[in-house]
Structures are given as structure tokens and as C-alpha cells.
Image (cartoon, helix red, strand yellow):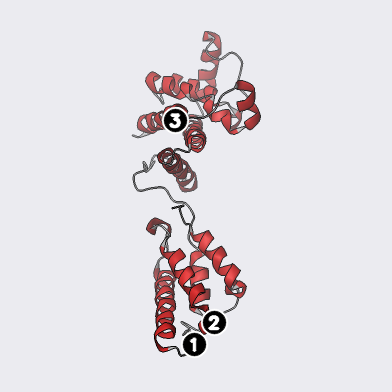
Amino acid sequence: MPRVVPSQVAEFIDQLYPSAQTANQIHIHMGATGFLAGIVSFAKQIPPELITLTGQDLADYVLSIALIEDIRQVWLAAGAHWQLPNHRGTSPIALLRRALAKCPDEVPSPATAELFFVADVDLRDSIRRDISAANQDMVNAEWNGATVLAGAATEALLLWAVKSKSGSWTAAVQALLAAGTLPQKPKSDPEQWTLIELIEVACHLGLITPKTATQARLGKDFRNLIHPGRASRLGQVCDRATALSALAAVEHVVRDLTP
């Protein structure tokens, strides 16, 4: 079954009750038992890790589902049109919709490396989401997603590592140019470097081991296959092998950068 995320359920509610986004009161008649069943069933398919609510938001989410389920049972059993009770002056449908809007559609799996060495919380979470999604794509045999996301995470980690050595990478570039490791001088801003430039400088600075650099080099071209034109010109496609190579590279980089 496809993965259900909060935004999908919120959009489903919007289709049935468009006013749920803004109005507190929503009239729901007894003939809507099927609609309510669909909303509850859909919401219960959301993976628990995506329900990141706390405090009052979490209470609203849990109670809204319970109230919707209860009124359905009353209508089905008694055949009487008792109104869906409000909570805190608001329809449970509206409360549920607003709670779902506060939940993310994607979070890193608990098994994903924490990356605490990256101080920037937003950057750390972004990289962790890419790694987690790459692993999930691997499980689902989505080779393109796994390859490209793992490559993007590798690139982001190496960029962070090189920038953290701002007083050293200029000399490293000169040494690599002199040795012929880099065929041409990279741009002055590491943000504009290619993945191979980041790999070579990071290795020269001792941020990653030669073994890790070798693994990362295997994925340097696969990272670019996100561009259909390039893939067509090179006659390359993502497959299980490219996904495994890219995932291995990012795991090697994480290991080396972890204190």
C-alpha cells in the first residue's frame, strides 16, 4: 500500500469540507458516515513518526478522531441525527485538519545517523532526511531516488566539512592542482564546486580517508543523473548497483566525519 502522509489526508478533508481550513463550525449530516469513515481510515494510515504533534495539538488530533468515530457509531446504531460535538468551540473536522497541517510529510527514520557534528540544525535535518529517503527508496527499488538522494547527501556533507576548514582548503587546492589531481582550478566559492572537487579536497585535508574517497568517486557521475539530458547523453541509468554505490559512499563519509 502506498505511504500516506499528513498533507494527503488534509487535502482529502479539503475536498470533502473546504471550509475546514478556516471555519470553526462545519455542519455535518447523518448521511456523511462514509465520508467520516474515509477520513478516519486515511488518518490512521499515517506512519506514527509523522505525527510530530505535542501538547494541545496532539490532544486535538487524538480527540478529534475519537469524536468522529463515536458520532458515526451513534448514527449507525441509533439512526438519530445527533450533531458532531465541538471541542473548544471548533468542529473536530476542522481541528483534525489544522493538526495535520502542522505535521511533516517526511522525517528521518530512527535508524538514520544523527549527524550531531553538524551544528546547523536545519542543515543537519535536511541531510538526514535525504539519507533516510535514499534508504527508503532503496528498499522500494526506486533506484533513481536512492542514487540521487544519497549523492546529494554526500555532496552536502563534504561541502560542510570543507567549509569548516576555511583556512586550509585554499592551500589544498593549490597542492592538488600542482599534483595534477585536479585538472583545473575550482571556483573561488566551495558552494560552486563539483562533487569530485569536494571529494579530492576533503581527502587531501584528511577529512575523509582514501578508501572513502575511492567509494565517493564511484558515485560522482551518478549524482548528475538527476538531469535527464545528461543521462541520455551518457547512456547511463540508475539501477541497484548505482544505488548501492551511492549509499555506501554517504555511509563512509558519515563514519569519517563523526568524531
For label 2, the crowd category at 10 Å Cα-Cα, with few meaning under 14, some 14 to 19 and many 20 or more, is some
Task: Determine contact: label 2, label 3, CB under 8 Å.
Answer: no
**Helix, strand or loop under label 3:** helix
Near-viewer residue (156 or 147): 147
Near-viewer residue (218 or 57): 218
Q: For the point 48% across and 84% down, which residue is it?
A: 84
Q: CA distance from mark 1 to mark 3?
A: 54 Å
Mark 1 highlights which residue? Answer: 83
Q: CA distance from mark 2 to mark 1?
A: 7 Å
The reply to whether residue 141 is in sight is: yes
Which quadrant holds the C terminus? top left
Q: For the point 54% across and 65% down, which residue is it?
A: 10
For marks 1 and 3, the one nearer the N-term is: 1
Disc marking residue 28: 2
- In the rendered image, which quarter is residue 207 located in? top left
Disc marking residue 240: 3
How many numbered discs sit on the rendered protein?
3
Q: For the point 36% across and 29% down, which residue is it?
A: 256
For label 1, the crowd category at 10 Å Cα-Cα, with few meaning under 14, some 14 to 19 and many 20 or more, is few
The reply to whether residue 188 is in sight is: no
Which amino acid type is shown beneath numbered disc 2? Ile
